[in-house]
Amino acid sequence: MSRCPTSLARRRALGAILAAAALGLSLNGPRTLPSAVAARAQAPAPSLAGCPMLPPDDIWNTRVDDLPVHARSAAWIRSIGSDTGLHADFGAGLWNGGPIGIPYVVVPGTQPKVPLRFEYADESDPGPYPIPPNAPIEGGPQSDGDRHILVLDKDNCRLYETWSTYPEGGGWRAGSGAIFDLDSSKLRPDGWTSSDAAGLPVLPGLVRYDEVAAGAVRHATRFTVQRSQRAYLWPARHFASSIRDVDVPPMGARLRLKAGVDLSRFSPSTRVILQGFKDYGLLLADNGSNWFISGVPDERWNNDLLRELRNVHGSDFEVVDASGLMIDPDSGKARQPGGGEPTATAEPTQAPTTLPTDIATATATPQSGPTETGVPEPSATERVAIGTAVAADDPRLYLPLLARERR
């Protein structure tokens, strides 16, 4: 995989030039997005700091606009919420003292590596990790939320991700951690978590300001649901639920915005994001609030424009059958549209994988959260403590911070 030859400074300069048009600072007419098939085929794969965000033929970076609809699409959309609007779980400014979104930090290959202690060491890649002492933490240093830390080693193109991360001595302790070679589509061992419930990397699925400013989101976008199934679909490797209802979506489900959804009523920047949802779709990667779209915090975001996503509802989406893209169940490498191979099976054969792992039960207590970017209001998201048993289909079992559920 070749690296992007453009320097970081030049990319930033280009982003600044494009930002005004792409982010709605100039609204002199609708922005024209490339639509020719040839242009799509030649579109550059996502990259960051000179590193690929996984290979160009990885499932994260593969278009799904021509895939067949999954047989359980209608049921899974209803489960997530047909009438519920999207929520940009990222933006500018702070909420509860922390940035809005999931931050990351880029480090050189010489960054000192420090020890980590994992709660779930048997499903974590052992340290040390090159985490700086001042690494940005999801939600901020005082957060009691997911506390993801994402570190990109730009010289070796290695991605280090941890969940529930706290400083400890000269290093860190975390719930779980994973290391990804960004030149490879190799998946984690079957049944393993990562820093995300689905066992997938987080950073490649985040919406970033610079890619929107450049005019295209060319990868699937990470999103969350309140209730997921005790099952997972390729490329996911792990479930995080006790719910066996087949009408509830499993981890790894791939959704796309329907082709007929009119984007002309949205601002240019929102159209870029939504076009990405049509072309590359959403990928269910963690439990949380319904239709929460993940992205990177950035002071350049316009929160008012991001709120336009609330006008797109669950009924505007459909689940696709991506099973025909799979080449190897242990790899995220995908068959490519127009590559002379079928892009999907004609019949929906994407049966969720389930594991016989015992799932602990829990009791839930409510918390508050932002229901629109930067605006704190009560949220359906709950935080859980291990304890009292509840029914297997109790909606409280979806929760992202249920440590035992992540096993």
Image: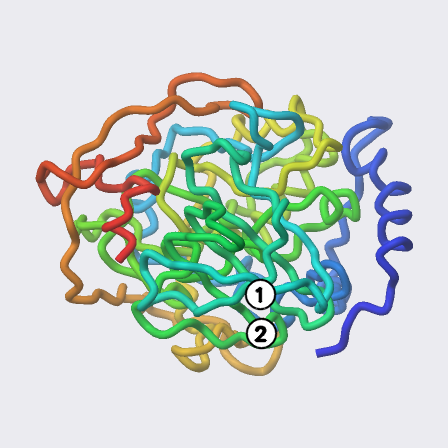
Q: Mark 2: give few (<14), some (14-19) or many (20+) Cα within 10 Å.
A: many
Q: Secondary structure at mark 2?
A: loop
Above or below: residue 331 compared with residue 214: below
Front in this rendered view, residue 388 or 238: 388
* Residue that carries the numbered disc 1 in the rendered image: 62
* Left or right: 233 as drawn, with respect to 157: left
Front in this rendered view, residue 265 or 387: 387
- State the CA–CA distance, disc 2 to disc 1: 7 Å
* Residue that carries the numbered disc 2 in the rendered image: 336
Quarter of the figure that contains the C terminus = bottom left
User: Residue at horizontal 73%, vertical 54%?
Assistant: 35
Q: Is residue 222 in sight in this rendering?
A: yes
Above or below: residue 323 compared with residue 396: below
Q: How many marks?
A: 2
Locate residue 52, reporting x and y percent. 68, 67
* Residue type at tag 1: Thr
Q: Is residue 280 in sight in this rendering?
A: no
Locate residue 335, reporting x and y percent. 53, 76
User: Residue at horizontal 28%, vertical 24%?
Assistant: 366
Residue 323: quarter of image = bottom left
Q: Give the colour scheme shown.
A: rainbow
Quarter of the figure that contains the N terminus = bottom right
Do residues under tags 2 and 1 come within 8 Å of each other at their CB atoms? yes
* Left or right: 386 as drawn, with respect to 251: left
Locate residue 215, reporting x and y percent. 76, 47
Q: Which mark is residue 250?
A: none
Front in this rendered view, residue 241 or 229: 241
* Residue type at tag 2: Gln
* Left or right: 388 as drawn, with respect to 172: left
Q: Secondary structure at mark 1?
A: loop
